[in-house]
Amino acid sequence: MKSLKDKPKFNAIAFIASDVPEAQLARDVLAKRYGDAQPAEADAIVALGGDGHMLQTLHRFINDKIPIYGMNRGSIGFLMNDYREDDLLARLADAETSRIHPLSMIATDRAGKAHKGLAINEVSLFRQRHQAAKLQISIDGKVRMEELICDGILVATPAGSTAYNLSAHGPILPIKAPLLALTPISPFRPRRWRGALVPNRAHIAISVMEAEKRPVSAVADHFEIRDVVKVEVEKARAIELFMMFDRNHGLEERVLSEQFRY
């Protein structure tokens, strides 16, 4: 693929559709009209589906530096552009590109095995059984919270701050903010703790206390590890993703607008 600095003309497009009939039909129509390149040979990938499909597509090509343009054939479509069959080449040429970095997760289980995962939206920890989790939180090697009793906790990127993080009453982060949101899920003690904003260069370590009695699972987007004893999270600086949006409807504008919804 050409360098993004060369402003490719997007002559070769790869269409990746979710399994829903609307997305499959859209793929057939668009591929017939614009051709359908192999992803490795494409100037851009067009993802057809909903937000979940967009995340899956970003993960699938996470190391390939191919710009991805989504068109909504799902429900919410926060990460997608409106679906239209006309003028696709012009829309791609005029699109704004958001460059984002995922989170790197290393989750160590009770057997001592380390599992690595990447998250575009968030890394989450959840209690596995009826008892609340007991967690200890460290930032850059310093313990910041000795004990958090809760259903779980998550670390969200700015891109993911409007997803599960917002549902858990976490803050919305501007897309270019050099921050991560650390948000508790149903905190019991300390009851009034609402979370924290930490620099995106920070190394976050969450230790599970009483892990056998109070088992916890860790999830990086769709990748889950059960019975963890420690989860380490930091920005994956070496990985850069390119999401394309119609002009004046980019990710920065969407995140800003979300703060004024009621």
Image: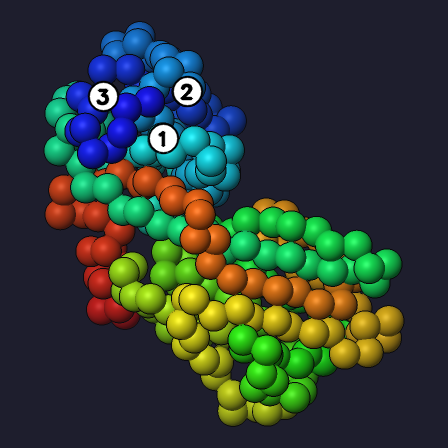
Q: Which residue is mark 3?
A: 10
Q: Which quadrant, please, contains the C terminus?
A: bottom left
Relative to 19, is 211 on the left or the right?
right
- Dot 2 or dot 3: first in sequence order is 3
Residue depicted at 22% across the width and 69% down the height: 260
Circles 1 and 2, Cβ within 8 Å, touching? The answer is yes
Q: Quadrant of residue 43?
A: top left
> In what element is the residue under mark 1?
loop
In the drawing, does residue 106 fall left or right of residue 132? left
Q: Residue 119: image x %, image y %? A: 52, 52
Callout 3: SS: loop
> Does residue 142 lie above or below 8 as drawn?
below
* Residue 257: x %, y % from top left: 22, 61
For label 2, the residue is 39
| Label 1 sits on residue | 66
Q: Amino acid at mark 3?
A: Phe
Q: Amino acid at mark 2?
A: Pro
Front residue of this view, candidates 180 and 22: 180
Query: Circle 3: is it few (<14), some (14-19), or many (20+) Cα within 10 Å?
Result: some
Q: In the rendered image, which quarter is residue 93 located in? A: top left
